[in-house]
Image: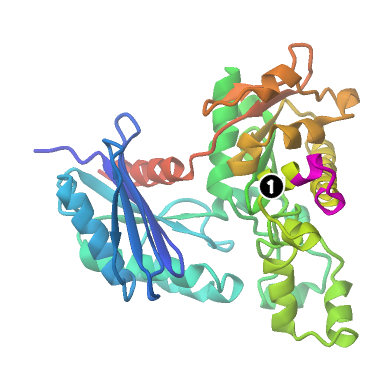
Amino acid sequence: MTEATRVLVLNAGSSSVKYQLIEMVDGERLAAGLVEKIGEHGGRLVHTPRSGLKRETAQPFPDHSAALKAVAEELAADGLGLDSPELAAIGHRVVHGGKRFTAPTEITDEVLTEIRRLVPVAPLHNPANIIGIEVARALRPDLPQVAVFDTAFHTTIPEYAARYAIDRAVADQHRVRRYGFHGTSHQYVARATAQLLGRDPAELNVIVLHLGNGASASAVAGGVCVDTSMGLTPLEGLVMGTRSGDIDAGVVFHLHRVGGLSIDEIDDLLNRRSGLLGLCGDNDMREIMRRAEAGDEQAELAFKAYVHRLRKYIGGYYAVLGRVDAIAFTAGVGENAAPVRAAAAEGLAELGIAVDPELNSIRSGQARVISPEYARVAVAVVPTDEELEIAQQAYALVHKGW
């Protein structure tokens, strides 16, 4: 009998589906791809098999069902069909799991109902995740389907750190609290940092900085998250590509009462027209650094605001943890923007934090330490792998049940 050792990871967005098929014996990517513009004109599927030779298909995908059927056909063309006995599970990224879902969970009708109940606190993400789950269950009703939640890693945050200081009854009624996001990335990177340093994760205190277009920080004590920058929604915290991050709540009232903006307009402003984009008209850090180096004052301001907020969180989480063994930079900006890493560490020598300019300038896809040997705190660049984390969690859950 063929052993089932493969996991298909699905990340369903409102108009897209990202996927990877991973062999769990050695972590090899057997296939990966993206379907985009689902339900729109100009639909496209890009499929990359293990050979690396991409196949691109341009056709309309009226809904997620059509998109996933097309994915199944691409996988079948490589001998990796969804009907393969080697497929152990399908792992689904689900953005919001609330307080209930603290670990990977096999999807049942009851679980799906609870994910639906969380839609009001994740209206942009959970509905798309649900569609992906429903279509995948219809395609393979006999196969274990596992939900891995972005919020799960952060459910260990102490109540005093998760609570906002507002009326408790109102907060409880409307589920208002700090949930945090990017949890699979923070969990993976915290563990990978310990591995890089040859340390036991249970003994290591790490500040993880996930810096992409969306950005978040976390304080991880002995493998357990004790604080994170994103809150009820992914809007709170660091300056991001198009999101404001931390802002006085009174700004919302001011813009509504004095500026005449509607609630929807303010929502759009803070989520899609703020952050780096709002400050300088660009949300690509590469372009912002190029412009700043050329003397563009708006780009320079955006860069400094970004780094200033980053340094505040590093200092704040240093205080929360009491002892910091490592700081890990990850995601697109964190892994590739050496000037951001250098600026974030500048002036923090008294905290034992320093970056070696030569090590920092090296471009590599491998996890690496970029701090000098004398530094008390190891500063590292650790590429994230959220898909592998989802696959590992899904596989561990179903494998345990065999």
For the residue marked with disc 1, what is the amino acid? Glu
**Residue 301 visible in the displayed image:** yes
Residue 66 falls in image quadrant? bottom left
Q: In this rendering, would 85 be left or right of 245?
A: left
Q: Residue furthest left?
A: 1
From what the image shows, is residue 168 above or below residue 30? Answer: below
Residue 268 x, y percent position in the rendering? 69, 74
Residue 242 x, y percent position in the rendering? 69, 61
Residue 279 falls in image quadrant? bottom right
Magenta residues span 291-299
Q: Residue furthest top?
A: 373
In which quadrant is the N terminus drawn? top left
Instruction: Name the residue: 48% across, 44% down.
Output: 386
Crowd rating for badge 1 (residues with CA inside 10 Å; few <14, some 14–19, many 20+) = few
Q: Which residue is mark 1?
A: 287
Q: Determine the main secondary structure of the stretch shown in magenta.
A: helix
Residue 394 x, y percent position in the rendering? 37, 47
Element under disc 1: helix
Instruction: Name the residue: 27% across, 37% down.
Output: 50
Q: Is residue 173 magenta?
A: no
Q: In this rendering, would 101 be left or right of 265?
A: left
In which quadrant is the C terminus drawn? top left
Instruction: Name the residue: 55% across, 34% down.
Output: 383
